[in-house]
Image (spheres, rainbow, N blue to C red):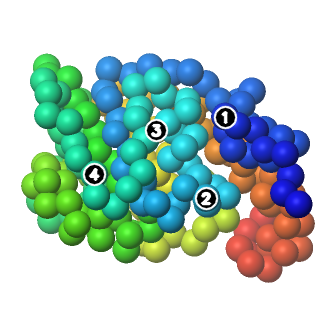
Amino acid sequence: MSRPQCPYCQRPSSHCLCPLIPSLTSETQVLILQHPSETAHALNTARLAALGLRSAKLVVGEVVSVPADERDNYLLFPGEGAIPLESLAQGEKPLRLVVPDGTWRKARKMLHLNPELATLPRVSLPTGLVSRYRLRKAPAPGALSTLEAIVTALNILEGEGRFDRLLRPFEALIEAQIDAMGQETYQRNHGREG
């Protein structure tokens, strides 16, 4: 028998994150393209971003389309030819960040399946960032969760610290997971202080 679940944040009712989820607005639109396998993941950071950011939209699927309107679309994904996100901070035209959500392998697959995405100009975050995602081993230095990448990007584009409140439910989620597994298991599997 499954535990009762909050219909909004989709966490067990006993661990509902709704009181911590802000309702923020950004000038920059955020389009999160989530791989279908991520929807049921216990630590669904893309969903937290979409719930806390009114100017975000979450689309689930391997094949997706990007709106064509007055906004310039930029793919937030490292790679050859990616320009530093900081270079867009003083732009006149409204932006849309297109953010793939999934493992690195699945995100690359989505780019392969969507040639339109692969043609978007790429932007990258600064190097040397450290993830707060203590429950997952980063595949490479500077790898962030989807939520952390969105918060970092919006803070760069619209003002340092403006979107940090989006991280509150993420941090509570991580703490709850660590508490559930116990400090000993956490130490053994993740090798860090809790």
Q: Residue beneath label 4, please?
A: 64
Say which of 3 and 141 sits in front.
Answer: 3
Badge 3 density bin: few <14, some 14–19, many ≥20, Cα 10 Å: many
Residue beneath disc 1:
8
Task: From this view, report whether residue 112 is shown above or below residue 83.
Answer: below
Question: Closest to the observer: 56 or 24?
Answer: 56
Contact (Cβ within 8 Å) of mark 3 with mark 1:
no
Alpha carbon separation for disc pair 2 and 4: 19 Å
Front one among 142 and 154: 154
> What amino acid type should be assigned to the residue bearing mark 1?
Tyr
For image coordinates 80% across by 73% down, the residue present is: 187
As drawn, the label of residue 151 is: 3
Viewer-nearest residue: 146 or 56? 56
Q: CA distance from mark 1 to mark 2?
A: 14 Å
Residue to which mark 2 is pinned: 40
- Any part of residue 16 in sight: yes
30 sits to left or right of 111: right
- How far is mark 2 from mark 3, CA to CA? 22 Å
Q: Amino acid at mark 2?
A: Ala
